[in-house]
Every structure is written in structure tokens, then in C-alpha cells.
Image (tube, rainbow, N blue to C red):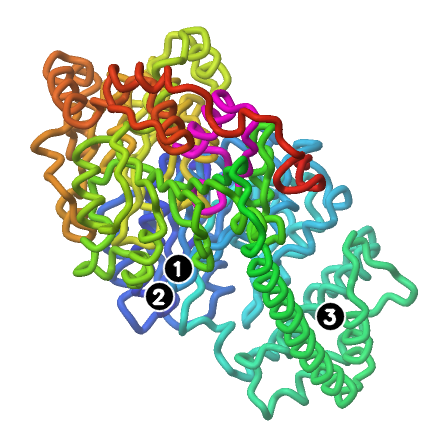
């Protein structure tokens, strides 16, 4: 008896069926049977199912003689199911990697409930993947399992069959089956939840719900949408036979009204000549099944407009309903126009405010910093800001960041919200501006202002004007705008000679290049062993474990986050003494990270400091990320996983062939990566030789004093060489500006205190 029976009906989904079946059969949890039902599909679905059944004994092929519809096709699969739990998956949807392992773990933790509800994400044809907006209702806090009465808000979620696992014995005891017709999920899902003696939730995306551009029945204009009324007749018929469930009548009535209004409002569903009949039948059912004086159990408040719409539909007042819809649409349009007008007026006022502020004197004691497009306290700007406060305590610093990142700032640094009046005041009057990306394009640098561009990595991939012949790889084709921004730079920070040559050619302008090394790497020379051990403990790295930091870069030729490694298999092959710290690229910050949970896998994607992650790890595995140039300064092993070098080089272009001068061993496949670690090659003499040559080429200025050199040159004007001799000269150069007594905080008294 398998743990799971996965039932996949298929009708006219030949373009998606293979991906759907693969998503089941490649699950890391293999204890399953896959029942694929060909609903007499006129395309290649039947032959695809037969091919899978021929090569995998876990697949059962079922062929229906006639097209019966989604409900009967599921019933055909249900009749052959033998698993402990039933899972339904449509033939164009997919299971997320690791979903079945997560399900079985949760089922064990919750005592094998009758129904387990899990989350989903909509996978749009454009490539976007968006998680269910009601995912917060799947919080795992509280009792492991419960009755629906304890969590009635679950009924407010999408009432579909494929976001739940059902205990087969429970389904057979209740006699649950699917009816024919559209909206067949409705008379299955409501009874399954209402009658369950135990329900549990899993706060994890387990299904990717494909949003097809064409072909979906929910976007097909047909009179078959009137079949929704038969389905709700079945729901309330079930309720009538279970008097103990009568208390749910008001809740189901409200959900029915919401469903009817949603179908009626969707212009893609009902033909024009069916709309009057739909409204009349909806009105009849809403009157028939109304519970007089009953109140919904859902802890959700309806808007006044929705309450009126439900009442008008129930009363059959179609003209009033249409008038309300027109007025509502007009109100939304007017509201949008008013909002746009308000934004326009605010932007006009801020532009005027900025112009006025530019007429006021500069504040030479104020330095404004930013990093990573309004991110938190990080990278070279953070290291420079800290050193500036150390060497010039009377200087005042401010940091541009979104409110979500304000907590990362030191107490002495003022947070500036992008677009606010204080933000524009600071840009207009600060004596110094420091960033590792770009400031607002509306910035007009004034005479006397000093702008330092620190960059945020040594360029392996092509940048700037070198992307003119690669439009697919550049985020913007406005190269003239790029150069206008560079023309405002007074200084450009470079980590090594290679970077200097690249930037001066790729972004040519009249700035002064400071080949001083990267300040963000200074911490590598200051951290003590005790601090490193504390970092490892805080991250959850077990004592004695070898911590591998896996940090790949993004791919210009892909919209979604690529999965280069099978983490579960990698950790199994490496053995128990390894821990994997996984950091996805910030480009994929909002992407669904649905890899399988593992006790020796730590997701550090949101950790604020990549430098701390470097210090906490014993080795780095990366592909083409510039992090390798920084990590080399630690003189710790680096392994390159170059599984798609040719594609990456063709899409983005690189300045040199990394394979000819790598910082360590190179793996082209996951098996080669495992072999490099299990044989000890990752820390062998050959890897050490490669790393030494790499460090000599790219890390000659990483001596722990880069921030000091930058502060003394930019803020003091003291010229210093990049080596130890120059550093010594810089240390004796004297006081920095800001050492005199100030006249209050440069942003004014209200900006002095940063909210936490």
C-alpha cells in the first residue's frame, strides 16, 4: 500500500502533461502510485500516459471510452486508488519539488488527519509565480489538528480539490465522489471539510496552479457555467442529510453568493444571452437556501457594497444590480483618477521642494549612503559609513532605505525613506553621496557635492557599454542615461586592476578611480575565532560540521530561479558532516523557494550580511558570482559549479574564461561536485595553488584597511597609495572634516531619531 495515490486526469493538456507527470515521479519521496486518467482526449494525452506507464511501474494508465468530464475522470482514478492518502492534480498543474516529503512529514506531525490543506502558487504563462494571497490562513501555530469549527476561515480559501490531501479511509467512509459538470470541486470540497473529524494545515507551496493564456474552462464563454447551480444544489442537499452540520448553512450561503457574483462579473464566462437566466437561477437558489436570521461563521467582514450586491441578487433585482455594478466601476475609476491626481500633486510639490533645497547651502558635515536599490545596511557603503563615524565622530550620516530595512541601520545613522521630503532635502544638501548602485535619476549634483560610486563586485560578466550588443542581457538599453549618471561620479572604487580596466572602458567618464580594494572585505581581517563560532551557532551550523556556502548568481537568459542542484541528494551523497548554507541571488528575492526542508540545509537568502556568511562557512560553491573574488580574500577553498558555462557566456558575455584561471576546483555536474568534496580535492594542494594565483591577481589590496583609505582620500583629500606604505601615510594624515562642534543634526530635529 503506497503512502500517496496521486490522481491526474488529462484532457487536451498534451503540452503540459509531461511536466505534470514528471513533477510527481521525480519527487524525493518515492512511496506513491500515479493514476493518470485519459478522459478520451483527442490529442496525444493517451499516448503520453502509456509511455510513462511502460517505463515506471508506479504509473497506472486509465483510458475512458468517452469524454465524461473532470469529475467522472477523477472518480475513475479514485476507484483504482490504494494509497493511504489521495492527492488530486490537474493535468496542466505541477507538484512543487519536495512537496510529498513535506506532506508526509506534516501528516506524521499532525496525527494522520482526515484532511490536510496545503498552499499553492499561481504559475502564469508569462513566467511569473505568485503565491496564494490568503496563505496566512495556513499558519501552523496552535493545535496540530482541529475541527473546521476551530478554523472556519479555511472555508474562505479557494474551494478546490487539488490543494488538499485526503485520507482514503475517510473518503470511502463518507462516500465522497465527484459529480458531472463544471464546478465539480464544489460538492466535493465543502462536504470533505465539514464532515472531517480532524483537519490540519501545511504552510508551504505544494502545487503550482497553471494560469493558461487560453484553453482554461474558467476563461471560456459558454452556457455550461450555469451548471454551477446544480453543484450548489448538491452541497445543500448534503447539508440537509446531516442535521449536525446545519449550523454551517449561513456560511455556505454567503460563499455561494460570493461565487455567483464572481461568475456573473467575469466577462469571459457567460454568453450575453445566458446572463439573464444565470441571474434568475442565482436569485432562486439564494432565496431557497437562505437561513433566516442566520449569521456566517466566517470571521471576515463583507464590504457594504458586497452585502448590497448579495441582497440584490437574492431579490432578483437585476436592473439595480447592474446599476450598482456600473456605479461601482465608475467609483473605482474616479477613485483611481483622484489617487493619480493626488500622486501627481505630491510629486509636483516634491520637485518644487527639491529645487528650493538646492538653493540652500550645502552641509559638508552630512554624508548620505545607499546600497542595493534602497536595501539595508550592507556592502561597501556600510563599511565606509562605519569607518567614517569611527574616524570622524562629528560627521552626520544618513541611509536611504525602504522602511522594511530600517532596523538594519546603526542607531547613529538616520533612515531616509525614498521619495520623502527628507530624502530630497538630503540629496540636495549633503556634502557627500555614497552608493554601490545609482541614485535617483532626478538627482542634480551640485557644485561642491562629492559622489562616490563603490560598485558591488568584481566584474566577471560584461557590464556597461560592453552590453550594447547584448540587449537581452542588460536591464536597460538607455546607455546615454548610464553615462549621464557616471558623469556625476567624482570617484569610482575599484577592488583590483582588472576592475579598474573594465570600468574605465565600460563606463567611461571623468571620475577618479580609487584602486583601494573593497571595504566590505575588511571584516575578514578583523573577525576573531570566537566571533566566527558565534556566527556559525547563530546560523544553526552544528559544531564540527563543514559548512558550505552555496551562492549562485542570476541568469539573464531565464526569468525564473534556476535549480542547479538537488540539495537533498547532494547532502545525502556528501554525508552527515556537511551543512549547506544556501543563498539565492537577490534577483530572485520574491521567488518561491520550494526546496525540500532538510536538517542540514539552512536558507540564508534573507541574511543581511553576505560577509558574515562567508566568515561562517568553510568553503564556497558558486558558479559565476562576483562573490568568489571577495571570498578568495579569506584564503578558504572555492569550488566552481559551471554546469551551463556556454549558455551563460553566450547570453551575458564574460571578460575572461573562468575555466582557464579558476580560484579552485571546477565541477560541471552535481556528481563531479560531490566527487570533489568526498575525495578531499576541494582542499587539496592543487586547489590551494589555483586559489593562490587567483588571490594574487584579484585580492592584492584586501589588507583590512580599504575603508580607511577611502575615508581619508574622499572625506579628507589625502592621497594614499593602496599598499601598506600608503595605508601608514593615510593613518597619520590628521583629522577629518566634522571634527569641529556641529550646529545640530544636518537633517533637522525631526530626522534625528530613527524609528525602530
What residue is pinned by disc 3? 257
Packing grade of label 1 (10 A; few <14, some 14-19, many >=20) is: many
Q: Quadrant of the N terminus?
A: top left
Q: Position of residue 208 (x, y in %)?
A: 44, 53
Q: Position of residue 34 (x, y in %)?
A: 38, 48
- Rendered residue at 50%/59% (across/down): 75
User: Is residue 2 visible to us here?
Assistant: yes
What residue is pinned by disc 1? 91
Q: Quadrant of the C terminus?
A: top right
Q: Quadrant of residue 687?
A: top left
Q: Residue furthest left?
A: 660
**Which sits in the foreground, 522 or 255?**
522
Which is in the foreground here, disc 3 or disc 1?
Answer: 3
| Circle number at residue 13 | 2
Residues at badges 1 and 2 in contact (C-beta under 8 Å)?
yes
Q: Quadrant of residue 117?
A: top right
SS under mark 1: loop
**Which sits in the foreground, 242 or 576?**
576
Packing grade of label 3 (10 A; few <14, some 14-19, many >=20) is: many
Relative vertical location of residue 320 with respect to residue 413 in this rendering, above or below: below
Q: Is residue 499 magenta?
A: no
Packing grade of label 2 (10 A; few <14, some 14-19, many >=20) is: some
Q: Cα distance, mark 1 to mark 2?
A: 6 Å
Q: Cα distance, mark 3 to mark 1?
A: 29 Å
What is the span of residues highlighted in magenta in the rendered image?
A: 371-399
Relative to 16, 267 lies left or right? right
- Rendered residue at 36%/21% (across/down): 522
Q: Residue furthest bottom?
A: 273
SS under mark 3: helix
Amino acid at each position: 500500500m503506497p503512502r500517496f495515490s496521486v490522481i491526474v486526469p488529462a484532457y487536451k493538456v498534451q503540452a503540459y502533461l509531461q511536466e505534470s507527470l514528471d513533477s510527481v515521479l521525480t519527487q524525493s519521496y518515492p512511496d506513491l502510485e500515479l493514476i493518470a486518467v485519459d478522459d478520451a482526449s483527442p490529442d496525444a494525452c493517451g499516448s503520453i500516459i502509456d509511455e510513462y506507464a511502460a517505463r515506471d511501474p508506479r504509473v497506472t494508465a486509465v483510458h475512458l471510452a468517452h469524454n465524461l468530464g473532470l469529475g467522472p475522470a477523477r472518480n475513475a482514478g479514485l476507484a483504482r486508488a490504494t494509497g493511504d492518502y489521495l492527492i488530486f492534480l490537474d493535468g496542466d498543474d505541477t507538484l512543487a519539488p519536495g512537496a510529498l516529503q513535506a506532506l508526509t512529514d506534516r501528516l506524521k506531525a499532525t496525527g494522520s488527519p482526515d484532511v490536510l490543506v496545503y498552499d499553492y502558487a499561481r504559475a502564469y504563462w508569462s513566467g511569473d509565480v505568485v503565491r496564494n494571497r490568503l496563505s496566512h490562513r495556513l499558519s501552523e501555530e496552535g493545535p496540530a489538528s482541529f475541527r473546521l469549527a476551530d478554523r472556519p476561515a479555511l472555508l474562505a480559501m479557494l474551494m478546490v480539490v487539488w490543494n488538499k490531501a485526503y485520507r482514503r479511509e475517510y473518503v470511502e467512509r463518507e462516500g465522497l465522489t465527484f459529480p458531472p459538470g463544471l464546478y465539480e470541486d464544489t460538492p466535493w470540497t465543502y462536504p470533505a471539510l465539514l464532515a472531517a473529524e480532524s483537519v490540519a494545515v501545511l504552510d508551504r507551496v505544494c502545487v503550482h496552479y497553471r494560469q493558461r493564456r487560453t484553453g482554461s474552462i474558467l476563461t471560456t464563454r459558454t452556457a455550461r457555467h450555469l451548471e454551477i447551480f446544480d453543484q450548489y444544489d448538491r452541497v445543500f442537499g448534503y447539508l440537509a442529510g446531516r442535521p449536525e452540520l446545519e449550523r454551517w448553512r449561513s456560511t455556505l450561503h454567503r460563499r455561494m453568493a460570493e461565487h455567483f457574483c464572481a461568475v456573473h462579473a467575469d466577462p469571459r464566462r457567460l454568453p450575453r444571452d445566458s446572463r439573464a437566466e444565470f441571474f434568475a437561477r442565482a436569485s432562486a437558489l439564494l432565496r431557497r437556501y437562505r437561513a433566516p436570521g442566520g449569521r456566517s461563521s466566517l470571521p471576515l467582514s463583507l464590504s457594504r457594497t458586497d452585502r448590497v450586491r448579495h441582497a440584490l441578487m437574492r431579490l432578483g433585482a437585476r436592473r439595480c444590480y447592474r446599476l450598482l455594478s456600473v456605479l461601482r466601476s465608475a467609483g473605482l475609476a474616479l477613485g483611481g483618477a483622484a489617487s493619480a491626481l493626488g500622486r501627481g500633486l505630491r510629486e509636483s510639490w516634491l520637485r518644487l521642494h527639491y529645487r528650493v533645497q538646492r538653493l540652500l547651502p550645502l552641509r559638508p558635515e552630512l554624508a548620505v549612503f545607499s546600497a542595493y536599490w534602497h536595501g539595508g545596511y550592507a556592502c561597501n557603503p556600510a563599511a565606509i559609513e562605519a569607518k567614517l563615524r569611527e574616524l570622524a565622530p562629528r560627521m552626520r550620516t544618513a541611509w536611504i532605505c525602504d522602511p522594511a530595512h530600517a532596523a538594519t541601520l546603526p542607531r547613529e545613522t538616520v533612515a531616509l525613506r525614498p521619495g520623502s521630503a527628507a530624502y530630497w532635502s538630503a540629496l540636495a544638501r549633503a556634502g557627500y553621496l555614497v552608493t554601490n548602485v545609482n541614485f535617483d535619476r532626478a538627482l542634480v549634483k551640485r557644485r561642491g557635492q562629492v559622489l562616490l560610486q563603490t560598485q558591488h563586485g568584481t566584474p566577471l560578466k560584461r557590464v556597461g557599454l560592453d552590453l550594447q550588443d547584448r540587449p537581452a542581457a542588460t536591464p536597460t538599453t538607455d546607455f546615454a542615461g548610464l553615462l549621464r549618471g557616471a558623469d556625476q561620479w567624482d570617484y569610482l572604487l575599484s577592488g583590483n586592476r582588472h576592475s579598474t580596466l573594465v570600468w574605465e572602458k565600460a563606463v567611461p567618464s571623468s571620475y577618479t578611480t580609487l584602486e583601494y580594494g573593497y571595504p566590505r572585505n575588511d571584516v575578514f581581517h578583523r573577525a576573531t575565532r570566537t566571533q566566527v563560532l558565534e556566527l556559525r551557532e547563530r546560523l544553526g551550523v552544528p559544531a564540527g560540521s563543514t559548512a558550505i556556502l552555496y551562492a549562485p548568481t542570476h541568469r539573464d537568459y531565464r526569468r525564473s530561479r534556476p535549480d542547479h542542484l538537488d540539495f537533498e541528494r547532494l547532502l545525502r551523497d556528501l554525508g552527515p558532516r556537511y551543512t549547506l548554507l544556501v543563498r539565492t541571488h537577490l534577483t530572485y528575492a520574491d521567488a518561491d523557494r520550494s526546496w525540500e526542508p532538510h536538517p542540514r540545509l539552512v536558507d540564508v537568502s534573507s541574511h543581511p550580511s553576505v560577509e558574515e556568511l562567508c566568515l561562517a562557512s568553510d568553503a564556497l560553491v558558486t558558479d559565476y558570482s562576483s562573490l568568489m573574488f571577495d571570498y578568495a580574500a579569506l584564503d578558504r577553498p572555492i569550488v566552481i559549479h559551471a554546469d551551463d558555462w556556454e549558455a551563460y557566456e553566450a547570453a551575458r558575455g564574460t571578460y575572461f574564461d573562468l575555466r582557464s584561471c579558476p580560484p579552485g576546483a571546477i565541477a560541471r555536474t552535481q556528481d563531479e561536485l560531490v566527487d570533489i568534496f568526498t575525495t578531499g580535492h576541494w582542499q587539496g594542494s592543487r586547489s590551494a595553488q589555483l586559489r593562490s594565483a587567483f588571490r594574487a591577481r584579484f585580492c592584492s589590496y584586501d589588507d583590512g584597511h580599504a575603508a580607511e583609505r577611502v575615508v581619508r582620500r574622499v572625506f579628507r583629500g589625502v592621497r594614499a597609495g593602496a599598499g601598506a606604505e600608503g595605508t601608514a601615510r593615510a593613518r597619520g594624515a590628521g583629522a577629518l572634516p566634522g571634527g569641529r562642534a556641529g550646529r545640530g543634526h544636518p537633517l533637522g530635529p525631526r530626522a534625528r531619531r530613527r524609528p525602530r
